[in-house]
Image (tube, coloured by chain):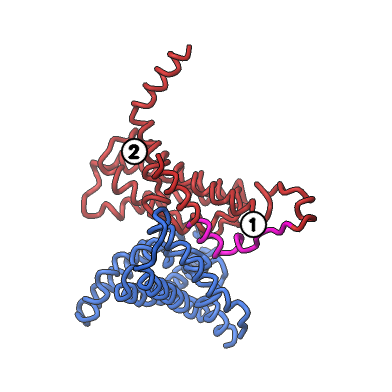
Chain colours: A red, B blue
Amino acid sequence: MNGVVAKSLATVKRTVAYKEIVKAFWKANPISKQILGICSALAVTVQMQTALVMGVALTLVVACSNLIVSLLRASIPRNIRIIVQVAVIATLVIIADELLKAFMYEVSRQLSVFVGLIITNCIVLGRTEAYAMNNPPGRAFLDGLANGLGYASVLVGVAFLRELFGSGRIFGVPVIPEAFYQAGYVNNGLLVLAPGAFIMIGLFVWLEHTLLEKK
Amino acid sequence: MENLISIGVNSIFVGNILLSYFLGMCSFLAVSRNLKTAAGLGVAVIFVMALTTPVNWLIYTFLLAPGALAWAGLPEINLSFLKLILFIAQIAAIVQVLEMVIDRFSPALYTGLGVYLPLITVNCAILGASLFMVERSYNFPETLVYGAGSGIGWCLAILAMAAIQKKLRYADVPTGLQGFGQSMIVTGLIAIGFMLFAGVSV
């Protein structure tokens, strides 16, 4: 039984999909390794909920724009490829923005302009330009998905720490027991403010780099 | 008038587009290694932002906002969902035109700024300023002040960062923290410094 599991696991590990995902998650994470898309990573990580929604929105936009650009790649003239890519991305972002407004109005208001700013998020244009222009649609879609998830994982990690220590909540639910506050525990208000985001990401990346070096 | 001064001060210091709204981080991190290039990019951003934000205001108010097409006899049309795509196209176009105009009339300025101008199209601070202008429903004079103020704020932040990076060159930073992690924490400290202006009201 164990042998079968190990064998199938080994087959999974050899597939392109697995390698791409591990790469995007860990070795070449868009945020902590390639330093792309920092703006939104900082702005939406005050709460878990906004971070999660933003991560999902970005993942869908990267995956779909990679797919579309990859399908079109043979017919896009080399000189105007950037503008074509931006047009594809902008269209997808508008769709994402309108969907959020329709179904999750509260979250969409908290995210304010940052959904729109996915257009200028370097991850999206970076992936379409570097990967989708030279690879078949299936692989490009997967690459977009993996990079989006790698981005979302950092976002959710930072948001978890900021919400937990900044306001003592997870997904808006108080998790730090009342007894702690009575014993003198205080939420760290700095983490909710803008400078807290910078410092938290800095520490997060430090932790990640240190862990990675040991492996 | 007081309102305008307060918007100006706010957009430069307290509501700094980089330090409290996190826009334009990518080029901020990439270009802040050298004080001279940082200054070049900073000036270019002031220039482009002061120009594109008011132009986007005109586009939004007379073409896209709900009921904006009343002058064409179509008062019930609302095109505001198109603002993302039109704003980014407009910014790209202005940057392109600006590059050609500067090249034609001031070659000296072009050699100084030219390299940075294409970078600016993908600087999210520029698009962000236009989107904030819509969200906060500024009127035209307010938009003029806000656009210029945000640019100046961004420029101040990158100058501070470049100067600190220069001092840190010989600092002994732990291995894992080098590079990205360290710049993030330094930026956080600059942001705390800028927050001191929060008590200043005009």
Residue A204 position in % (x across, y down): 50, 52
Q: Quadrant of the C terminus of chain B?
A: bottom right
In the image, farthest residue toward the top? A1
Label 1 to label 2: alpha-carbon separation: 38 Å
Q: Residues within 10 Å of mark 2 (few under 14, many from 20)?
A: many
Earlier residue among tags 1 and 2: 2
Snapshot quadrant of residue A4: top left
Magenta span includes A188? yes
Residue A140's label in the rendered image is 2
Q: Amino acid at mark 2?
A: Ala
The residue depicted at 51 percent of the width and 72 percent of the height is: B16
The residue depicted at 35 percent of the width and 68 percent of the height is: B170
What chain is tagged by disc 1? A
Q: Amino acid at mark 1?
A: Gly
The residue depicted at 55 percent of the width and 85 percent of the height is: B5
Point out the stretch of residues depicted in magenta: A185-202
Snapshot quadrant of residue B109: bottom left
The residue depicted at 39 percent of the width and 55 percent of the height is: B175
Q: Main secondary structure of the magenta part?
A: helix
Is A1 drawn above or below residue A137 in the view shown? above
Residue A112 position in % (x across, y down): 56, 59
Horizontal placement of A16 versus A145: left or right? left
Q: Which residue is labeled 1 in the image?
A: A166
CB atoms of marks 1 and 2 within 8 Å: no
In the image, farthest residue toward the front? B172
